[in-house]
Image (cartoon, rainbow, N blue to C red):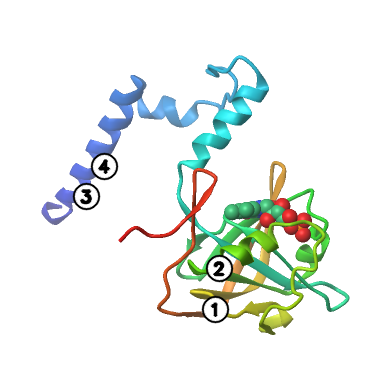
Amino acid sequence: MRERLPEIREAVSLISILKYSTGMPVTQLMNKPYEPDSVSPWSSAEDGHRALRDTLGAFATGVTVVTALDPDGRAIGLTVNSFNTVSLDPPLVLWSLSLASPNLEAFRRASHFTVNVLAADQQALSERFARRNSDKFADIDWREGLGGAPLLSGCCAVLECRNEAQHAGGDHLIFIGRVEGCSRQDKAPLLFHGGRYKVLGD
Ligand SMILES: Cc1cc2nc3c(=O)[nH]c(=O)nc-3n(C[C@H](O)[C@H](O)[C@H](O)COP(=O)(O)O)c2cc1C
């Protein structure tokens, strides 16, 4: 009991923060249904959409290109910054794809996808893969990885993933990948923040 005191103290202080920042008991907080519009300060849906985009833009991310092979053996890919880690054991990652993507079905059916983490000098690659209907793989250096999913040259990291599960997520589909191979190079990453590309300042 004595050695668990720090953990107990931490739990008590978390409960206090939750209670005093909202004025509500924690049990009530946990049972409270999600009411997206009830506290909206926005005068129109358009305002809300803009405010949400700007707010989400405050979260700095890296930039990736997620690739796969479609059922006809054609390389597909797009620029993605919704990538994130899920779990170390088992090794799981996630990213989300717009339901409007012409490659939605191909990504759903692919056995594998590759997350190519772009380096600071690869902004042009990010712009290329963010353009719809262009010949994204023309004249760039890549090779096939697990399940044929393209590995782009010059990236600062690469994660080769089995296409493990997909979950509905509003106007996006969330892909969960099980990492079957990964590698990294000692290169600075490309960053995205406030709707702009950036590089590390230090
Ligand atoms: C920095 C950045 C991050 C992006 N992240 C995502 C993302 O996570 N999911 C997504 O569906 N589209 C994302 N996009 C938009 C797609 O890259 C873009 O719509 C692209 O045209 C999709 O390719 P497709 O039309 O071949 O599906 C992002 C674009 C940029 C510039």
Q: Is mark 3 on a helix, strand or loop?
A: helix
Which residue position is annotated with label 1? 154
| Residue with the mark numbered 4 | 11
Amino acid type, callout 1:
Gly
The residue to which callout 3 is attached is 7
Q: What element carries label 2?
A: loop
x and y percentages locating residue 108 in the rendered image: 77, 63
CB atoms of marks 1 and 4 within 8 Å: no
Residue type beneath disc 3: Glu
Tag shown at residue 99: none
Q: What separation in Å lies between label 4 and label 3 (alpha carbons)?
A: 6 Å
Q: Nearer the viewer, mark 1 or mark 4?
A: 1
Question: Looking at the image, in which quadrant does ligand 1 appear?
Answer: bottom right
Q: Distance between the residues labelled 2 and 4?
A: 44 Å
**Residue drawn at x 56%, y 74% as measured from the top left:** 159
Task: Check disc 2 and report the residue beneath it.
Answer: 122
Residues under numbered marks 2 and 4 in contact, where contact means CB atoms less than 8 Å apart: no
Q: Is residue 41 shown to the viewer in this render?
A: yes
Q: Distance between the residues labelled 1 and 2?
A: 8 Å
Residue 29's quadrant in the figure?
Answer: top left
Q: How far apart are marks 1 and 4 (CA)?
A: 45 Å
Q: Do the residues labelled 4 and 3 touch (CB within 8 Å)?
A: yes
Three-letter amino acid code of the residue under disc 4: Ala
